[in-house]
Amino acid sequence: MALAMFAVSCGRPATDKTILRVASWAGAGEDNEYFRLVDQIYRDFERDNPDIKIVIENMPGDYVPKMMLSHIAEVVPDVVILDASSSALFKKNGVLQDLTPFLEKDKAFTRDQFYENTLLAGTYQDRLYSIPVDFTPMVIYYNKDLFDKAKVPYPKNGWTFQEFMDTAAKFQSIGKKGFVVSNWMPGWVMWLWNNGGSVLDPSGSKATGTLDSPQNVKTIQFLKDLVDKGCAPKLTEVSGTGVDPFANGDVAMATSGHWSITGYKSAKEINWQRLGIVSMPTQLTSPVTVYYESGLGIGNGCKNPEAAWRFIKHFCSYKNQLRYNSSGIAVCARKDVSAERAKDPIEHDFIELIKGSRPPLGAEVEGYSYVEQQGEKMMDSVLNGRKTPAEALREMARRVDREFDK
Amino acid sequence: MTSLRQRENRSGWLFVAPATIHLFLFALLPIGFTVYLSLFRWKLYRPDKTFVGLNNYQYSASDPAFLNSIWNSLKYALVAVPSGIIVALAIAIMLNQKMRLSAFFRTIYYLPAISSGVAISMVWIYIFLPENGLLNTLLGHIGFKDIDFLGKSETALWALAFMSIWTGLGPKVVLFMAGLIGVPQTLYEAAELDGATGWRAFRSITLPMLIPTTLFVVVTSTISAIQVFTPVYMMTKGGPEDSTEVVGYHIYSEAWTSFNTGLASAKSFILFILIAAVAYIQFRMTKKQLEGHSVQ
């Protein structure tokens, strides 16, 4: 650990300029259109701010533990990327500086430029710790070509679980499956929400009595039924093949975020322009979904927070956000950029779903990644037929409570 | 005389100093610090540490996930160690024959030992793929179809153990070959005069003469099998369900996912004791065998 701390604090170039250390999820030498775009935004900042030099600190893989190590070594980068899924850990443990005073002073850069709920992932006790850079609500993608071929009407926002099941069952006639149940808890947690269930109690510290509720048992059974009734491929047919059955044109609907569009555009078996998106099916009066987001914050040890704030404003400006989001990776949290991008029908449909989206529980609960790990084990045991949903959820709740009691 | 002895002593100490300092800094000190940390309840990223005495050890002893991970590691070792040794011995005997391309095959069998564990794991993910994986394609010719080796809790741990036979081959083969070269040729000649050749000579001469080598290979293989981490981290993340959550991966998750540094330290020290105990038992058992066994 001491070696890691030492390594983190080494390797700074000698220069008269203010060094701004910017954390990055990319690996050193990673090169694709997205990273070239981001790099161009960095270079533009250096051109406009000749007194500042940006030094990228690559942290590919295990970003959260690496950031926590840099926190205890007091070498947190000046500009930190905040992933909504783990932001509680950063916000509650003093890793970041409060951005509220910067925002209050800055008349040209205001909260109301952003969708209000996208600021929640970076908010703790009414203070703002990150400015959203990109985000995406989780939605259902559907393949219009397969719907037309099977003569199934396109789904509409607000559809129910039963309507979803009926729709998913209609593709076997053309030799396809209706839906793919992928076992990744961030990709299925909103099914629980849409059936009135939750993962943790309101205090965020106890699972028993909430996670193993009758609603959640019904929801997990519903997802299992999709597989058992042949509406969705078995888990073993999906996992480990390295093939996305939706991108491969074998499945008519899939749950994912905006990031998938980049892959769908290059998929040979589907026409991405014939894709639609629709809300999650719901048993509530209006659908809800989870959103995933990355934002930029200022590290607690940053010696020149004004420079870091200038950088964040530069990255989150209208011009740069328009360029950044043209990569197709996500939806923009800025209303003006999204309004511009809404001319594209898919972007328009994504923006429609923003209002029903909530941050992931990892934005509120420290250690939520453990819950997600256990969620996947729970779902494995149900879909592989080793446990009933009730047994599996009870076991998961017991484990989560034990973990939170440690 | 005294001065000469003193000089020799000093030289001796200087020779062992680098290794001793290295051992102290990178082995003994971290072990001591681990034991110290194991007495505290401590979230890595929080400044406050609470002294809890032996509570972390008590908790670990009743932690079903930790006990399950130890059980998984033992199951893995019980399969990976004997099968790895049998295959390595067979290959060493084969390579020990005077055959063409023997040096080439020696190099080939050693390659996994010098390859990156991460890269090897990535290759084996593709070998194990259910539909178009190499193994399933081969098995398809004899009637087996699309086995999801890593995706099913019944097969995942055994798939990793199977993979370890290949990845751990190089050093074992080298050790066995060195052992085989050390068997005096005169023993085989004497046995031949008595009419003992082939299997009888192997059972009565080769195997007993290889006992010291086998002891070393068994102990080192068992230690590395119980410590297995890279393939689990890369290929299964402990799943499906908990079927491949081995103790090394469990401790990693405790430390770096849950950040329970005190508890992870206690579990690490328990693992240290476990490995030391297994190694001690193996030494005792094999030593007895060595003492009671002579070339017949």
Image: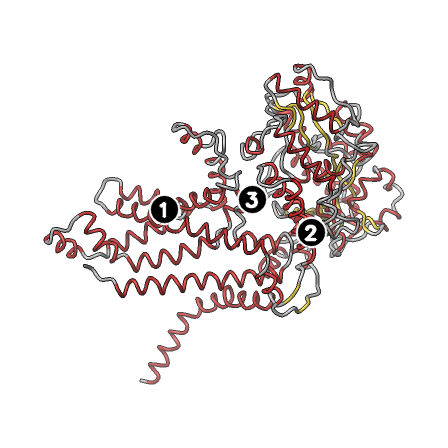
Amino acid beneath label 1? Tyr
Q: Are marks 1 and 2 in contact (CB under 8 Å)?
A: no
Q: Nearer the viewer, mark 3 or mark 2?
A: 3
Q: Which mark is residue B110?
A: 1
Image quadrant where one finds the N terminus of chain A: bottom right
Q: From the top left corner, tell me how far across and down residue B14 is, in percent.
A: 41, 72
Residue at label 3?
A: B239
Q: From the top left corner, tell me how far across and down residue A59 is, in percent.
A: 63, 47
> Which type of secondary structure does the marked residue at label 1 adopt?
helix
Graded by Cα atoms within 10 Å as few (under 14), some (14 to 19) or many (20 or more), the crowding at tag 2 reads some
> Which type of secondary structure does the marked residue at label 3 adopt?
loop
Residue at the spot 57% in from the left edge and 65% down from the top edge: B34
The colour mode here is: secondary structure
Q: Is residue A105 left or right of residue A328?
A: right
On the question of residue A55 being in view, the answer is no
Q: Nearer the viewer, mark 1 or mark 3?
A: 3
The residue nearer to you, when weighing B26 against B262, is: B262
> Which type of secondary structure does the marked residue at label 2 adopt?
loop
Q: From the top left corner, tell me how far across and down residue B50 is, in percent.
A: 68, 67
Amino acid beneath label 3? Gly
Residue at the spot 74% in from the left edge and 53% down from the top edge: A205
Amino acid beneath label 2? Gly
Residue at label 2?
A: A367
Q: Is residue B4 left or right of residue A36?
A: left
**Gap between marks 3 and 2, in whole Å?**
19 Å
Image quadrant where one finds the C terminus of chain A: bottom right
Query: Is residue A316 placed above or below A9 in the rendered structure?
Result: above
